[in-house]
Image (cartoon, rainbow, N blue to C red):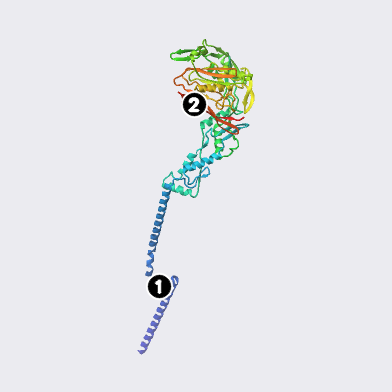
Amino acid sequence: MSNKNELLEKNTEKTEIENSTEVTETSIETEKNLINTNELQEPSKEEKTLTPAVFFPVANKPNDVLSIFTLLVSIFVGILLVIFAIFTIYNTFNTNIISGIYIKGINVSGLSASDAKYQLDNYLASKLPEEITLKHGDFETTISLSQMDISFDTKSATNLAHQVGRDGNIFENNLQVLSMMFGNINIEPNIIFNKQLLTKNLEDLSTQLPDSVVQSSYYIEDDQLIITSGNEGNIVDVASTIEAIKSAISTFSALDTPIEIAVKTEQPDEINVEQIYNEIRKDPVDAYYTKEPFEIHPSENGMDFKISLEEAKAMISSEKKEEYVIPLHIIYPNFTTNMIGTEAFPDLLSTFSTKYAASNRNRTTNLVLAANKINGTVLMPGETFSYNKVVGARTISAGYKEAPIYVQGRVEDGLGGGICQITSTLYNAVVYANLEITQRTNHQFVPSYVTASRDATVVYGALDFQFKNNRNYPIKLVCSVSGGIANFQIFGMKQEDDVEVQISSYETGRSATAIYSEAYKILKRDGQIIDKQLLSKDTYKRH
């Protein structure tokens, strides 16, 4: 019995020791796990005994950061708005050109439009020459910039400069002003000129080129129709030459050297015999006039080919010649205009005379021949007078002699030399009669018999002098060459609206190579000036 109790007690102790051992091992294992966890988190001693709840307040920090960021952004936007408002007010009340603007390379920033224009005008005036030289081969001529009204459009350029930063809305304007603080723009002013005047000047220049095109033409000499062939040649390419002039002026380049004239080759028109026939073929008409109403009906010669039209065509097409002669059959009227007498042309409308050297027989002969062709010519209302058509070609067969003429700036003997004095004399008489000038060209040099801008030159087949009878009644041209005086008289009938005519001509300037002049027609009634009209602006070479 005692032995059993002792054995039971031993077993009980053994069980307790084993349980104690298990508890100890469990505690040790648990402590190891805690140690490993603490090594990862590295808490302080105090944190070892705290629960994880102590970390929960950290979750509220993002809201605080967002609030601070929003506040900063609001402050920044507010500052920008204030700056924008101040910037806008400044730009609104600023009346000068903004920063960074140049015109033709001149800085006009901060200037008013008027001050900018003043500075620009002075700068360009110092850069532009008085005249430019044009050339084609050995041929040279000059053009006055002021005569052609060539200049820079500084007004538009400065107005455009002033509009930079002002032609949009508030935001666009401010953005443009800001951008100009870090960059700049240069405005090129346009070149302005009298297009009509420059175009006419260049077109007239075509006839002066040494290799200019010559159109076929015809004239009637007694009972012969004389047709002259045309020749291929050059004409001024007006548009291209104008662009070359503008380019040289715009860049200030090559203004000290001649500008090349742009030309293009042109063929003369084919001789149209049938058209010529239709133009000259007509029946004779007797002259007559009526008193109530007063009207003059001039006589007209009848005319026809002496050969058939087919024969004339064959003549032209069979052989290439400089001149073709077709015989004419002239049918004269029974009563000519000249027979009407002075009663049909009762009033002297104008007269003008020039002097010539009668000792120069060849030149005098040419003057007489040209004057006789014109003398007695009657122009009906609305009819145009053509000098070359009335006088015809200046040929040896027509009786013309060799006399001094201008050829490319030199004085040489030429057939028909001197007849331009008849043209110039007639020109002045026509102006004094207040007739309408439709075509007139000045000489290369100022002639001796009239002053500058009161002359008119002609070249058969190239340059003509033409005017129109713009009166209500017919006029009659009476011309005489005698005793060293060439005289023109224009007769007609006075009208209620007639005025007194004066001519004012004068030089406007001189350069080393040229003379510039202008002429005006002054109209008076009862001694009072009622109108002043520009006749021409001309450029002459100096001797």
Tell me if 438 is positioned left or right of 512 in this view: left
Residue 357 visible, this angle: yes
Location of residue 339 in the rendering, given as x and y in whole percent from the top left corner? 52, 11
Q: Position of residue 93 (x, y in %)?
A: 42, 47
Q: Which residue is mark 1?
A: 47
Q: Residue 529: x and y, percent?
A: 46, 26
Q: Quadrant of residue 40?
A: bottom left
Q: Position of residue 543 (x, y in %)?
A: 62, 29
- Considering only vertical position in the picture, is 399 above or below 188? above
Q: Residue 487 is drawn in which quadrant? A: top right
- Camera-side residue of 493 and 248: 493
Is residue 537 among what the camera can see? no
Look at the numbered disc 2 and give the secondary structure of its residue.
Answer: strand
What whole-number distance in Å separates the C-alpha atoms at marks 1 and 2? 118 Å
- Disc 1 residue type (three-letter): Glu
Q: Amino acid at mark 2?
A: Ile
Q: Which mark is residue 522?
A: 2
Residue 390, numbered circle: none
Q: Secondary structure at mark 1?
A: helix
Q: Relative to residue 352, is residue 236 depicted above or below?
A: below
Q: Residue furthest bottom?
A: 2
Q: Earlier in the sequence, mark 1 or mark 2?
A: 1
Kindly give the residue lying farthest to the top in the view shown: 334
Q: Is residue 45 left or right of residue 440?
A: left
